[in-house]
């Protein structure tokens, strides 16, 4: 029987060397859902999505289930082939490899598709340039988004997509992230096409520090990651409002109460 969950994370512990970063994470994301993760610096947010994507250097215990398959120990390339994709917070600059070469490797069949989205994301002049070399913050984020759109994964991890991005760029990134997630339908389409399009919605997991991306993307659920654990789950906009009003201090107090209660 086909599971309603695209991604399931069960009691995930992640260590780097002798240091345990994540201490028992549980998460379920349904097909078509987008979740947001908040948390103070150093709480393990980037470690979490890097471990889900299969990057090396992490010691993992627990289970990562994708499409009903245990992928906990699969290498990163096999996870990508199964439909996982990631946009980095600080992607590296790669000299000697042009952006178009990387994108063409992800989609060898449709050059018109590459041109369409490169033009929409104002990246036509960057296709022949080395990846991220001399790019501004907004240009890097748009290039990351272009790669994801062409890869067309079903599970999308976004690590602080608004980081280092000005207001003009974040609006564009928000618009095409919605497009990538299947949450926006172009005008002029028939209702039946819209319904079909919605059925193809992707799932997303977004790390956000400022919450600005949520002005453009509708998230279904929010989580606060603290001390390597999820402290709570709630409506992401309400959660963001509380964080802006009280910071993480209130979250720490609430989290400590829950931990003390669990110990009794």
Image: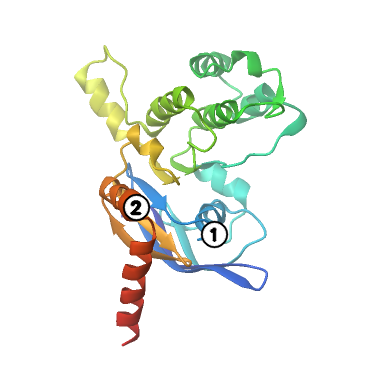
Badge number at residue 150: none
- Reply above or below: 249 against 67: below
Chain-order first, disc 1 or disc 2: 1
Which color scheme did the rendering employ for the protein? rainbow
Q: Secondary structure at mark 1?
A: loop
Please indicate whether residue 111 sits to the left or right of residue 194 in the image.
right
- Tell which tag, 1 or 2, sits nearer the viewer: 2
Q: Secondary structure at mark 2?
A: helix
- At x 28%, y 31%, the residue is 198
- Reply above or below: 42 against 262: above
Residue sitting farthest toward the left: 191
- At x 36%, y 48%, the residue is 35
The foreground one among 130 and 32 is 130
Residue 167 image position (x, y, % from top left):
45, 26
Residue for badge 1: 42
- At x 35%, y 38%, the residue is 214
Residue sitting farthest toward the bottom: 264
Residue 240 image position (x, y, % from top left):
32, 48
Residue 258 image position (x, y, % from top left):
31, 74
- Reply above or below: 73 against 98: below
How many neighbours does mark 1 have within 10 angstroms: few (below 14), some (14-19), or many (20 or more)? few
Quadrant including the C terminus: bottom left
Residue for badge 2: 243
Is residue 8 shown to the viewer in this render?
A: yes
Quadrant of residue 58 in the image?
Answer: bottom right
Please indicate whether residue 139 sits to the left or right of residue 30 in the image.
right
The foreground one among 165 and 75 is 165
Residue 166 image position (x, y, % from top left):
49, 27
Quadrant including the N terminus: bottom left
């Amino acid at each position: 029987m086909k599971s309603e969950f695209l991604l399931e994370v069960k009691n995930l512990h992640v260590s780097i060397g002798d240091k345990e970063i994540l201490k028992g994470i549980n998460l379920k994301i349904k097909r078509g859902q987008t979740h947001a993760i908040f948390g103070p610096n150093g709480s393990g947010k980037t470690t979490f999505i890097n471990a889900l994507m299969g990057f090396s250097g992490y010691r993992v215990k627990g289970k990562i289930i994708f499409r009903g398959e245990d992928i906990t120990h699969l290498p990163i390339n096999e996870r990508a082939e199964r439909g996982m994709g990631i946009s980095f917070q600080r992607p590296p600059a790669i000299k000697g490899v042009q952006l178009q070469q990387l994108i063409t490797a992800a989609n060898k069949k449709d050059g018109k598709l590459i041109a369409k989205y490169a033009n929409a994301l104002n990246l036509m002049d960057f296709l022949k340039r080395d990846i991220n070399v001399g790019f501004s913050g907004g240009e890097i984020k748009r290039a990351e988004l272009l790669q994801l759109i062409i890869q067309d994964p079903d599970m999308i991890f976004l690590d602080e997509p608004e980081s280092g991005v000005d207001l003009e760029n974040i609006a564009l990134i928000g618009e095409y992230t919605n497009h990538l997630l299947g949450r926006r339908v172009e005008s002029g389409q028939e209702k039946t096409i819209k319904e079909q399009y919605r059925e193809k919605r992707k799932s997303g997991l977004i790390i956000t520090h400022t919450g600005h991306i949520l002005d453009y993307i509708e998230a279904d659920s929010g989580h606060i990651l603290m001390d390597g654990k999820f402290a709570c789950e709630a409506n992401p906009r309400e959660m963001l409002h509380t964080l802006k009003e009280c910071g993480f201090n209130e979250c720490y107090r609430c989290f400590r109460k829950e931990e003390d209660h669990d110990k009794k």
